[in-house]
Every structure is written in structure tokens, then in C-alpha cells.
Image (cartoon, rainbow, N blue to C red):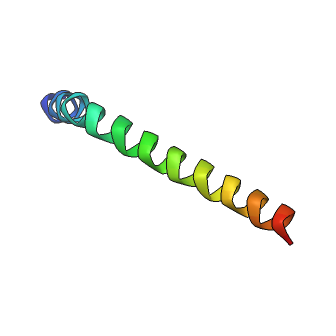
Amino acid sequence: MLRTQLNLNSAELFKPSIQKRNNDEIRSHFLSILYEIFLTFSD
């Protein structure tokens, strides 16, 4: 019981950094898709 409470607390602590990393991944993924489209049209 206590262990799950600790895990929840640490998950809450790490949530902002996880959110930021997800945003960065989404942004780079989006940029790579845009780049692919750009390459497709520039041929």
C-alpha cells in the first residue's frame, strides 16, 4: 500500500519532464513529416 503511494508521488514529480519530452518528440516528428512533404514536392 505504501509502495504504490510512493510510486504515485514519484510519477507526479516526474510528470512535467515527461510532458516536456513528449512535446519535443511530437515537435520533431511533426517537423520530419513536414520535411518529407517538402522533399516530395521539390522533386
- The part of the image, by quadrant, that contains residue 32 is bottom right
| Of the pair 26 and 11, the residue shown nearer to us | 26
Q: Position of residue 39 (x, y in %)?
A: 76, 67
Residue ID at (78%, 58%): 37
Residue ID at (29%, 33%): 15
Q: Position of residue 12 (x, y in %)?
A: 24, 28
> In what quadrant of the picture does the N terminus appear?
top left
| Of the pair 8 and 22, the residue shown nearer to us | 22
| Of the pair 41 and 12, the residue shown nearer to us | 41
Residue ID at (52%, 45%): 27
Asked if residue 5 is positioned above or below residue 3 in the image, the reply reads above
- The part of the image, by quadrant, that contains residue 3 is top left
| Of the pair 20 and 35, the residue shown nearer to us | 35
- The part of the image, by quadrant, that contains residue 42 is bottom right
> In what quadrant of the picture does the C terminus appear?
bottom right
Q: Position of residue 19 (x, y in %)?
A: 37, 35
Horizontal arrangement in the rendering, residue 21 relative to residue 28 (left or right): left
Asked if residue 32 is positioned above or below residue 25 in the image, the reply reads below
Horizontal arrangement in the rendering, residue 42 relative to residue 19 (left or right): right
Q: Position of residue 16 (x, y in %)?
A: 28, 31
Q: Residue furthest bottom?
A: 43
